[in-house]
Structures are given as structure tokens and as C-alpha cells.
Image (cartoon, helix red, strand yellow):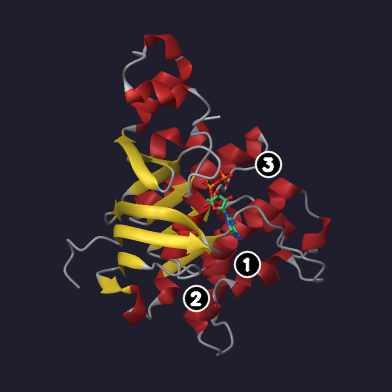
Amino acid sequence: MKSQEPVISLRGATASLGSRPVLRGLDLTVERGEVVALLGPNGSGKSTTVRAVIGQIPVTSGTLELFGKPLARFRDWRRVGYVPQRSTAASGVPATVREVVSSGRLARARLRPLNRADKEAVNAAMRLVGMESRAGDSVNALSGGQHQRVLIARALAGEPDVLIMDEPLAGVDLASQQVLADALAEQTRNGTSVLLVLHELGPLAPLIDRAVVLHEGRVERVDHPERLHDLACHPHDTNEADPASKIETGLLS
Ligand SMILES: Nc1ncnc2c1ncn2[C@@H]1O[C@H](COP(=O)(O)OP(=O)(O)OP(=O)(O)O)[C@@H](O)[C@H]1O
């Protein structure tokens, strides 16, 4: 692979849910080592975009490439870590935190028992999100924010080259948000690329290289997060005629 090839490349992508067209010609690129936030109002297609990228929703026209390969030929899923939109790690299954996080290592271990390197990666992932002391606890005994930490640790345990996360901070208290922001900062320092859906930039703002704002299944605007942050905090600085002024009306809240 050439190093210039983007980690994720969507060109003119369209996708539908049932009979409803949701992505309507979406262009999105995540370069190596880049952190890209997807923003936009409810229903603009953010979740659909990330689910299309991981192959859960078919792209009906346009192109989608991962690490320079068309999705249909992409096999190296261990390079991809995915944290779905808020769900619980538990689902009634009596698993411990360590077991759930270890499941994120399976694609790397390929059915052989976890070796020492695998176990170290699992411990490191739990440590990174501040859950190492809860390793032996049942995930059924965790709070919502702790579940979210475990799901992120599960994705990190596979040591992915790209992390794709759908609203990773939803329902997470401020202290946990900061723990997760620090964990992600550590990952990105190591060169991991990130695509994440956010409603608020919050403590992740300093990590984000590019914010992509969707509207009705297309990219409405691409900007540096500081500019969006300024608009959200000082909406009166914006010009009514400027499409940027739309940013204040709930795109970041
Ligand atoms: N299963 C489904 N069948 C039909 N339409 C759906 C389905 N799921 C979602 N949609 C519609 O697809 C559109 C895009 O949804 P999507 O979840 O991608 O938006 P989003 O930007 O992630 O929204 P949110 O901020 O609310 O999470 C919405 O109009 C939604 O109503």
C-alpha cells in the first residue's frame, strides 16, 4: 500500500435505508493519522455514514475504499476498530469486563488462545480507559459511562489502525469524557486514525483535525473544530447570510 492512500475514502456515495435515500452523494476522506469528526443535525446521515464505512449498510453508488482497497476486496478488518452507537456491553450476558475487552482481540488472535502479547494489549486497553481495577467485575454491574469505556477498550484491544466511533461520549459524565479523551489522545499520538460521530466537540475538540458537517446526506461544510467551537460559543459573531451561521442552531448541541 502507498502511504498516501487514505484510510477511508467515500466518493459520491449514496445509500438508502428501506426506501429512504439517506446518503446522497457523500464525499469523505480520512487520511492516515487524521482525526475527523462527523457533525450535523439529527437524521443528517452520520450513523449511516459510519455504518456504510464498516460495510453494515451497502453503498449503492459512488465508491468506498478502506486503506486503498474497494470495500468488496477489503479483508483486513483487524485494522478497523468500531464502537457502535450507545449500546450496552452487557446485553444480559454474564461476562466480565476482561472477557468483553478480550473479545476485541479475537480478530488478531484468529481463534488461537490469547498469548502474552494479546493479554498485554487487553490490559493496556483497560488501563487506558481507567477500567483495569474492574477487570473481574460483571459488565452487568457497570454504569452507562463505564459500559462505554469498556466498549472503547474492546475496540482499542485490537490495536486498530483506524477507530470508528458513533457518539462515543453520549451519556458519559464529564469525568469519564476526560478519561476517554485522554485515552484517544494517546492512541492518536501513536498514529491511529479516527472517524467519530459527535454532537458536541467537548473535551475531544483539541484532538480533532477536521470537522465535517453533514446535512441531508451530503457534506455541508468542512472546517477546523476551533472555528465551529467559536461559532457555537459566540453565535452573534456570525453573519445571517453565511451558511456557517447554521452551525449555531443545534449542530453542536
Ligand atoms: N431502519 C431505518 N429505516 C428507514 N429509515 C431510517 C432507518 N434508520 C434511520 N433512518 C433514517 O435515516 C436518516 C439518517 O439516519 P442516521 O441515523 O444516519 O442519522 P444521524 O445523523 O446519525 O442522526 P442522529 O443524530 O439522530 O443519531 C434519518 O432520516 C432516519 O430517520
Q: Residues within 10 Å of mark 2 (few under 14, many from 20)?
A: few
Q: Residue at x 63, y 50 (%)?
A: 130
Identify the disc placed on residue 159: none
Residue designated by label 3: 171
Residue designated by label 2: 117
Residue 4 quadrant: bottom left
Instruction: Tell me the amino acid under the disc marked 2.
Output: Ala
Q: What separation in Å lies between label 1 and label 2 (alpha carbons)?
A: 14 Å
Going from N to C along the chain, the mark reached first, 2 or 3, is 2
Farthest residue to the top: give it: 236
Instruction: Tell me the amino acid under the disc marked 3.
Output: Gly
Residue 140 quadrant: bottom right
Identify the disc placed on residue 101: 1
Asked whether the beta carbons under mark 2 and mark 3 sit within 8 Å of each other, the answer is no
Q: Secondary structure at mark 3?
A: loop
List x then y, in percent, for residue 36. 37, 46
Instruction: Tell me the amino acid under the disc marked 1.
Output: Val
Residue 221 visible from this viewpoint: yes
Q: Secondary structure at mark 2?
A: helix
